Amino acid sequence: MKCVIFASMPTNALMRSYCDGAEIIIAADMGWMHARRLGVEPTLCVGDYDSAEMPQFANVELLPREKDDTDTMYAARRAVKLGADEVILLGALGGRIDHTLANFAVLLYLENHGVKAMAADETTQITVLKKGKHVLNSQPDTYVSLFPVGKKALGITLDGFKYPLKKATIKASFPIGISNEFKAETGEITVKHGALYCILTKKEHPAYNM
């Protein structure tokens, strides 16, 4: 069952297609406003609403302002309890860097609970690659960056990329996995030990036009 979680950062029409086929739409805090702007009706709203007015929906869970979860983390835990096996986070990137990093942890939480998870915006897709072989379809004009979850990931092999690797170690203290590119119809990433954050970034990202 597919679930889309709207977090607090703005979304645009290019991200509307991520909601196709979703059976659950959860809006975290002011995420309900962004969902509404895309013409998407949340099935559940959660949050402490410290940064937005409380939505006037029937299904709203009001959270305390002082808590261990972020609003997005709580939404992810609710998605797991509701039986989601795929979750897409929208509005979870950009803005405060601490909240963006917290949403990386949300992705890892979901993957550790058997849920296929991705955070996305109009130019970026972020997933977690755990032990095993992962095949990515080539995307034109796209950077592929890999960062370890934790201190390091071991036995990393990259095939079908501009910069291949063979049983390499990717460490948190050295960003060797950044800004790779596809060189074949598919790219294969093998992880022997540990896990990776895989970040696909379109080259037309606003940061490259400054």
Image (cartoon, rainbow, N blue to C red):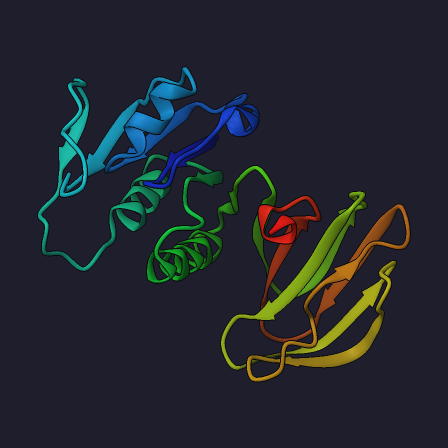
Out of 72 and 94, give the one closest to the viewer.
94
Q: Where is residue 187 drawn, in percent x and y? A: 82, 54
Identified at 68% across, 68% down, the residue is: 178
Out of 157 and 178, give the one closest to the viewer.
178
Out of 40 and 204, give the one closest to the viewer.
204
22 vs 132, left or right, is left
Is residue 85 positioned above or below 110 on the image?
A: above
153 vs 97, left or right, is right
Out of 149 and 52, give the one closest to the viewer.
52
Q: Where is residue 188 drawn, in percent x and y? A: 80, 58
Identified at 40% across, 54% down, the residue is: 103
Looking at the image, which residue sits at the far right? 184
Identified at 74% across, 49% down, the residue is: 142
Is residue 180 positioned above or below 203 on the image?
A: below
178 vs 70, left or right, is right
The number of numbered discs placed on residues in the rendered structure image is 0
Is residue 64 positioned above or below 58 on the image?
A: below
Identified at 67% across, 62% down, the residue is: 145
101 vs 200, left or right, is left
Q: Where is residue 87 drawn, in percent x and y? A: 47, 39
Q: Where is residue 119 drawn, in percent x and y? A: 50, 46
